[in-house]
Amino acid sequence: MRRLMFQIGLAMALLAAATVHAADTYVLKFATLAPQGSTWMKAFNAWGKELASKSQGRLTVKFYPGGISGDEPDMLRKIRFGQLQGAALSGHGVGEIYPPARILETPFLFRNHAEIDAVRASIQPAIDAGFRANQYELLAWMEVGNIHFFSTKPLASLEELTRRRIWQWQGDRFMDAFYSVNGWSPVALPITEVYTGLSTGLIDTVVSTPLASIALQWAGKTPYMSDQPMATGIGAVVVSNKFFAGLPPDLQALLKGSGVPLSQKLIADTRRDDRTSLSVLAKSTQPMVGMQQHHLKLAEQTALSRKAVSTLEAKAYLSADLDRKVDAALARYRGNQAK
């Protein structure tokens, strides 16, 4: 009887220990459009390994790359339903959470990365608070690269886009306003259907970064590119507030603390590889035969972008208060540079 009681007690102790261990283990199911092997996934994989190592296996990340969890709105819907806990998002996804942050990818607003960095730093607390108020914890800021126009045939000017089948990310209100003020009639598609759209002729023009254009295999369909970028695409690494709040304090600190170095690496790596991708596209003979560069009328496009921003402020998609802070920070930075 004593032996039986000992065995029962031992089994209960082992079960209790296993239960405590299981309760103290957390899996972050994380989705992204970034393909496996891309610049972004390399950074994410290293980040996941770091979290697992520093937490001694208590916090691990299970990645769903390459859009296997759907488009960004699909990812956010799955996060709301608890099927995912986090995601890496481009500007479109950011706009689904905190639209005012998209002021940072206003076409033709910034002249270089230094201006972007200075302005973003000045409004970062407001962006963090905006994400948190909308049920997400912003872990890291990222970029997807400089956005250019890519087309299947030459463009003498952007006015020709009124007769082209230009792609618009389905549900993207920010770019819809920009297209509208230019008089363009886009074809709305999820990003997961763009390659097929280019292949079938449903669309003949896209806005993309050199890095993304190569990673998503659009480059082979679009051998003509604008010479000047229209904007730098923004991005964010987020987790749901529910998941973050459910972590013990030490894992919260670990996850949040990993965000700054991850952000720095993502931005630096993206800018480096975007430049490399641009060089590849410019020098390649196949499939980039006939690569031409279309000059943009910057003064005219800047005025149209301002008009689009005003429209989005009136619709409460953008924040007039935050936008004026961006204008002030940009003017201050340029003034200091001039001195």
Image: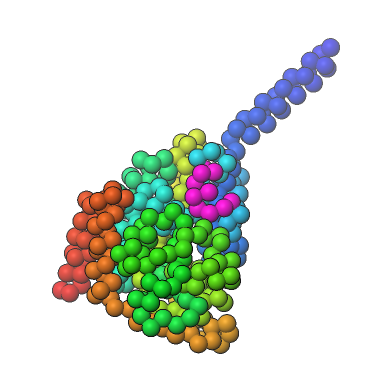
Question: Residue 164: in sight, yes or no?
Answer: yes
In front of the other: 174 or 143: 174
Q: Is residue 140 above or below residue 113?
A: above
Q: Is residue 269 above or below residue 277?
A: above
Q: Is residue 233 above or below residue 17?
A: below
Question: Residue 271: in sight, yes or no?
Answer: no
In front of the other: 157 or 81: 157
Give the x, y percent position of residue 334. 20, 69
Q: Residue at x 53, y 68 (%)?
A: 202
Q: Is residue 53 left or right of residue 1?
A: left
Q: Is residue 202 left or right of residue 177?
A: right
Q: Is residue 223 above or below residue 251?
A: below
Query: Which residues fall within the magenta stretch?
Result: 69-79
Q: Residue at x 70, y 27 (%)?
A: 15
Give the x, y percent position of residue 103. 31, 58
Q: Residue at x 58, y 70 (%)?
A: 200
Quadrant location, the C terminus: bottom left
Give the x, y percent position of residue 309. 27, 59
Q: Residue at x 46, y 69 (%)?
A: 165
Residue 70 colored magenta? yes
Give the x, y percent position of residue 320. 23, 52
